[in-house]
Every structure is written in structure tokens, then in C-alpha cells.
Amino acid sequence: MSLLLNEIGNGIFLGAFFGLVALGYSMVYGILRLINFAHGDFYMVAAFVSYTILGAVLVGHSHGQWWTVLWVGILVMVVTGGLAMLVNQLVYRPMRRAAILSLMIAAIGLSQVLENGVLVTPQWGASYLVYPVTTPAAGFNLGSNHYTWGQLIIVLVSGLLALGVYFLVGRTLLGKAMRAVSEDRIAATLMGINVDLVIGIVFFIGGALAGAAAVMTGVYYGQINYLMGFTVGLEAFTAAVLGGIGNIGGAVLGGLILGIVQSIGTGLFGAEWAIVVAFGALVLMLWFRPTGLLGERVARRM
Amino acid sequence: MTAVLETEGLSLQFGGVNALSDLSIHIEEKSLHAIIGPNGAGKTSLFNCLTGYYRPSSGAVRFQGSEVTGLDAAKVAGLGIRRTFQNIRVFPKMSVLENVLAGGHLRATANLFSIAVASPGFRRNERQLHQEAMASLEFVGLADQWNKLAGDLPYGMRKRMELARVLIADPVVVLLDEPAAGVSSVEREELSRVIQRIHDRGTCVVMIEHDVDLVMEIATTVTVLDNGRIIASGQPLDVRNNPDVIRAYMGRKRK
Amino acid sequence: MRGGLVVAAAAVAAFIPQMTQNQYFLGVAFQSEMLMCLALGLNIVVGYAGMLDLGFAAFFAIGAYTTGILSTKEHWSIIASIVPGVVIAVVCALIIGFPTLRLRSDYLAVVTLGFGEIIQTIAINLNQTGGPTGIYAIPALTIGSVVVNSNTGYYYVFFVLVIVFAVFCTRLRGSRLGRAWLCIREDEDAAKAMGINTNHYKLYAYVFGAVLGSVTGSLYAPALTAISPASFGFSESLLILMAVAIGGLGSIWGVMFGAAVVEIFPEVFRSFAQARLLVFGVALVILMVVRPRGLFPERAFQGLGAWIRARVGHPVIAPPLRVAAEAVMTSSTEEP
């Protein structure tokens, strides 16, 4: 029983990552109907960029780490957001009128560019790189399970960011514009909304969230690899679909559920079957409740 | 005369909006039945319910006496009810001929073996279908465009192609959603002729239209919708003079 | 005229192995043909039906592994082992396709991707599939008394397979199946108005793709005599997809050309090594931005229409036939 609780705890923690990345996926899908396959790779690039920055800044220092991580984290969020916006501007925007199929193929090409770009960059390459910051083991106990402060902070930060997005989309004028563009792009243009800017901002936010998740991954797991985006991307999309694509709350819920399911699954079957578990969950969900747990928020035209 | 297509108490709700309220319409066979009404009256929603694109919240749809409510759109098309769309939906990267052939989908060979070996039966069937497709195109005056990509055609031609695509299926009922919208007066004349010829062949035509002159010219029956309800139905002249109809279109008289 | 060109091209292609003894070249040549076969299979799913399949290598793997296992462990002949491979592939396609295809095709993309990963994970982790090292010592293909065990031999085997697949796909395209798929690709709602059961047809496309992929895989195993999980991952699915995208969605010649480019391009740029995929990715993105429909965008499909035109003369329908058609279409004979 305590093993199960432990796995659930781990699952919630894992879910925090999935949830953040899933949020980005969900938002872009909601506004463009596009599954941005490169999204997981934004996450990966962010991890490497933060690795380099932290490596440079933290040389020799071991005090004041956490403040450094914080401002580097914010910096990386901005950079990743910018990267996402750039990608949108250069690739997706000119393809606005193209068939969704071509868009997805372009996204895949982009994903390959990012992954292999990192692969060939001399300082990075193919091997697992050790992150310059690690979480201390200090923590607290809940029952017989030990959780570190680091884990708690990560979950809290994720929650705060998700909440921030929720308020942004639900309570601000910008959020209203986003929802408008998502429902009917042409009508939104006629209302005077700068659709391209709104879409750019959505990409920025998605990228920023991925950046945050990347830094947290680096700090917590201690190592990064050029293929990490691929797997997380798949899992994040699965989470988004589980919760209901286009739905903010759904992305977070989906992330948590997937984290827990995967945690239990790998406990039962072993770590190498993680992907199989994730996809098994996805296919099951699609069989029984295709609109996801919280339902889709994607406008149906007809 | 019997109703070939009818609804009973049809209601359709979207969230808080009542698109259709307790609507009972009877479309007689072999009629040319026009459905008119102000924008937002529910005309296209009615079509969508009739053709299986929307599932009504309540009520029934009957075709030739049998219940067809909630049937899938493809099944409804298979029964012999064909439609065009308000914002013309052609298959842009297929040729005009292939678009029309698509309309004849249910009449083409489905036997995989015959297809794979291009058996004589398959060739015969395809040849016949091709000839009927060309005949349909001739009927609407588009035979010389057969090899163009449908997406490259100008608006008026696409509208006519939609008609040809509907005809090859030899339908019992044809539902035309604003066939004369956005066309020039010359094309409107042509369309009017084509629609009448379709009707003359014995096919029941139901059309949503805003062009009152066209309706008065060719319709045998007119039904007026407003706010999801029928406010008048009958012979074209009677309906035109109906005060409720006038009020719906023009608003109340000022005192 | 066009038919003549095709035959001429085929004749030239058939002579290629006679003109060189270079095994490397022949190896690349038959691998190109094999990729063409795979691309033709994926073309049905992506090019005709417009569904993005990112895990096509899974069916390739299923065919290869089924043949590999049955021929080495149970001593089945290669030809016989094709059938169980196809059966497994079809069953998988149905299991994956049935829940997903009735939803938006965006979902299919990710589900197929996951399916590809699952198959590869299974291949890597199961003892029966030989684990990470895979299966080796796969016997050669025997057709009657002929044992095929050279690059030249497999060049001809895949040559025939390409022709069979190409003809099959053309036949499909010129029938109501192909038209239905294109309608689904262009406008799914309007397709329904034609009476097309879109869910069924999408499933058909996916299943046909699975069959073609599996058959190709079954012949790949003896051609290479050894298979390992590494050749059946997302990269492979991606290469096949690129062949289809580059060549032009739906165009048979375009897809074959795309496959040749995808296979030969890296060989030409061997020296780039790691950067190959990077260059590929960049090329793919640029291609999609500039030419979303591929290098050979579809023109009006000629098929039977051209045949009819040839038979009944210009203009499209000869006058007597036209008058007869008119008579059929109108009950009254009034002239405008």
C-alpha cells in the first residue's frame, strides 16, 4: 500500500512536468488545430540552453544557487518562448493556408532540425550531459515515504504557472482574444484582434512553459539528452488528449493522471515499457471517452 | 399527394439557442419546394437535420414514410436524399469529372478483386459511370471543363458542378442550399432552367433561397421560416401576401 | 504515348543490374526500390486518404520480424511467411485504427507514432524477437527452384514488387476506393454527402497500407539476412513519410521519385554523417513552406477518363452519344 502511495506521489510529481508541457501543446492546438511536434523539442532545446548558461554562470559558486537557478530559469523561459514565436513566424505563419497535413509534416521536419541541430553542436552532442545543478536530498516525510523539498517546490511552481495560465486565458482581455481566435479566426480579425500577434503570444507562452519544465527537469533528474524532447513530447500530447485537448484544466489533469498511470505502470512492468503504458492509456481513453476526461474545448464548425 | 420528406415536431438546440422549435414540415413528392426566411431562421439547420449532419434535440424526420431521424449523413445520402452546401463544398484537388464521379460513389463497383484485376465487369461499370458523369456535366453545361481541377473553377461553375454531382446519384430528393446566391443574373437564368429541368424529370427539389423572384418563378410550394418556426406555408402567391411573412421580413409597421 | 514512356523507363530500369557489378550501387538500388514499395503503401494512407501516419515502420517491422522468426525458428519458406505477417499487420491496423480513425485525423498521427514506438519497444525487449541484436541467419528467398541471394537478385525481386504495387495502387486510385479516399482527404463532411462511409474507408486505407508495408518487410528480411530493431523506429517512419511528402501526396511517380531521392541523397552526402538528418530536416521544412503539396502536385487524374476520350473521340463525347445523353437526362425535349 505504501508502495502504491509512493508511486502515486511520484506520479503527481511526474505529472507536473507532463502537465506543463501538455499545456503548451494544448494551447497551440486549441488556437491553430495544429499538433506542434516540435513542441517537445522546444523543451529539449531549453534544457540544453539552460545547461550552458548555468554551467557558465555557476562556475566555482555553490552558494546562492537557487536564486541563480531562478533568474536563469526565467531567462530560459523567455528565450524558449522567443524560439517558439520565431518558429511560428518563419514556418507556421507562411503556411497558414496550407493543409494541416503539410503543416504537421513541417512540424516533424522542424523537430528533426532541432534534435539534430543539438546533436551536431560541438558542446552538446549525443551523450547524456550532467546538469550543473542538483537538488539536495533534504526533505520531509509523509507516512513512510520521503519527499524532498525540491520535489515540493517543483510541484508548487508548476501549479502556480498553470494557475497563471488559467487566469490569463479566463480572466484577461488577452485571454479573451485567444479564445476568440480559437473559435473563429476570421471573425476575430473582423473584431480588430491582431490574430497573428495573438497566435505568436500563444506560442510564446507554450514555449515559456516548456522552458520552465526543462529547467525543472534538469535540476531534478540531473541529466539531459538530445532525445528527451521526443519522449516527453509524446507523453505530453497523450496527457493533453487524456484531459481533453484545447482544455487548460484538462492538460493539467491529464498530466497528473498520466504521471500516476505511468509511475504505477513502470513499477509493475519496468521502466523500458513506459512508452507502452502511456500509449496504452491513450488508446483506452480514445476507445471509451474520445473527448477526454474534461471534454474538448475545440469549436466544431458545421 | 404523399409527403416524400417530412418532419414532426423537430427541435434543435445549441446551448441556449433554439435553432429549430417544434417544426413540422411536409414536402410533397415531385414538388419544387422553396424554404425562405430571414437570416438565422434555421433554414440550413433544417437541412442539416434532414441530411444527418445534425442530430435534432427532439422530433422526427421521415423519408417515404420511414423514420430516418439521427441517421448518419452517409446513410441519408444513400437513401436518395442529396444536397448542396451553402458555401459550396467541392473537392478542390480532384478534377471536375472525378467530383461528379464521387457523387456516383454508391453506384460504382465495390468488389476489390474486380478492381485489382480491372475485370471486364469493372471496366463496364466505370465506363457507364463516366458516361453518366459526362451527361450530368452536359446537363449543367460544364462538359468542356471535365478535366479542370475543381478548385480552379470560378464560383458560378462550381455551383453548377455541385448540381451535376448531385444528379449523377439519381436522387429522389434534392436539397439545394441557396443555389442562386452570389451568381450573376445570366448565371441565375441558367441555374433556374437547370433546376426546373431537374424538377421536370420527377425529382423532388427543396431549395433554400433568398432570391424571391426566383422562388416566385419556379416554386410550387413555399414555406417560410422565422426563428426556427414555420410561419407560413403554401402556394407562392399566398405566402407572399401573408401578413406574418411581411412582418417577419420587413418588421412591424410604425404607428 | 504515356504508356510507351512507362514501358521504356521500365525496360531501362530492368537493365541496370546488367550494366554494373558494383555491389554497393546495387545494394542502394534495391534499397531504393524497397523504399518505393513502402512509400507506395504509405501513400495510400497519407497521399490518398490524407491521414498522417507516423508509425508506418511498425507494419514494415511486423512483416520483417514475422518472416524472420518463422523462417529461422520454424523453417517456414519466405513466401509462406508473408501471410501470417499480413494477418498480424491487419489485426494491428484494425485495433489501432478502429477507435482512432473515427476521431480527428490529428489524433491518428500521435497514436500511430506511439504504435511505432510500441512495436519497436517490443522488438527490443522480447526474447522471441532476438532483443536488441535482432534476428540473423535468415534464409534466402526461394521462388520455385531459384534461390535469390545476391543484390542483383533482390534488385529484380523488388523491381517486380514495385511494379505490382504501383499497378495495384493505380487500379485502386481509378476506382471508387481511390475517389472516396481523395474525397475524404479534401473534405470529409462533403464526402459523407456522397454516401461515403468515411470511417470505413479510412480504415480500409490504413489496412491497405499495413498490408503493403508488411509484404515489403517480409521480403526485406531475406534480402538483408539479418534484422534488428534499430531499422524500424521513428527515423524509418520519417524517411518513408518524407518520400511521400517530397514526391507529392498521391502521385505514384512522385512518390517513387521521392523514395529514390530519400534513399540516394544520404549516400551522396555520406561525408556529412551526423548532419545528414539535420540537412534533411531543413530541406523538409523549406519544402513544406514553399511547396506544401510536394514536388509533383496532383493534376487531374487521367485514368479511365483518358481511355474513354480515346475511344469515343474528341470532343469528350461524340455527338451521337451526346444527344442520347441529353435525351436520357431530360424527359421533355424542348430546346432553349
Image (cartoon, coloured by chain):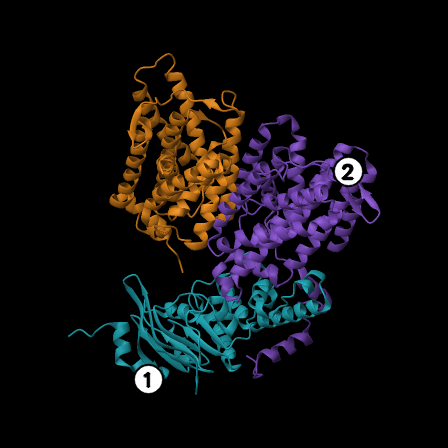
Q: Colour of chain C?
A: purple
Q: Check contact, mark 1 vs mark 2: CB within 8 A.
A: no
Q: Residues within 10 Å of mark 1 (few under 14, many from 20)?
A: few
Q: CA distance from mark 1 to mark 2?
A: 83 Å
Q: Determine the chain carrying the residue at label 1.
A: B
Res. C130 image quadrant: top right
Q: Is residue A92 above or below residue C101?
A: above
- List the residue tagged with mark 1: B238
Q: Colour of chain A?
A: orange
* Farthest residue, direction bottom: B1
User: What residue is drawn where x is 61% and y is 39%?
Assistant: C232
Q: Position of residue A235 (x, y in %)?
A: 44, 40
Q: Which residue type carries mark 1? A: Asp
Residue C151 shows which numbered tag? 2
Q: Colour of chain B?
A: cyan
Q: Position of residue C317 (x, y in %)?
A: 67, 70
Q: Choose between B243 and A159: the one closer to the eye.
A: A159
Asked if residue A107 can be seen in this view, the reply is no
Q: Is residue A43 above or below residue A56?
A: below
Q: Which residue type carries mark 2? A: Asn
* Farthest residue, direction front: A1
Give the tally of numbered discs. 2
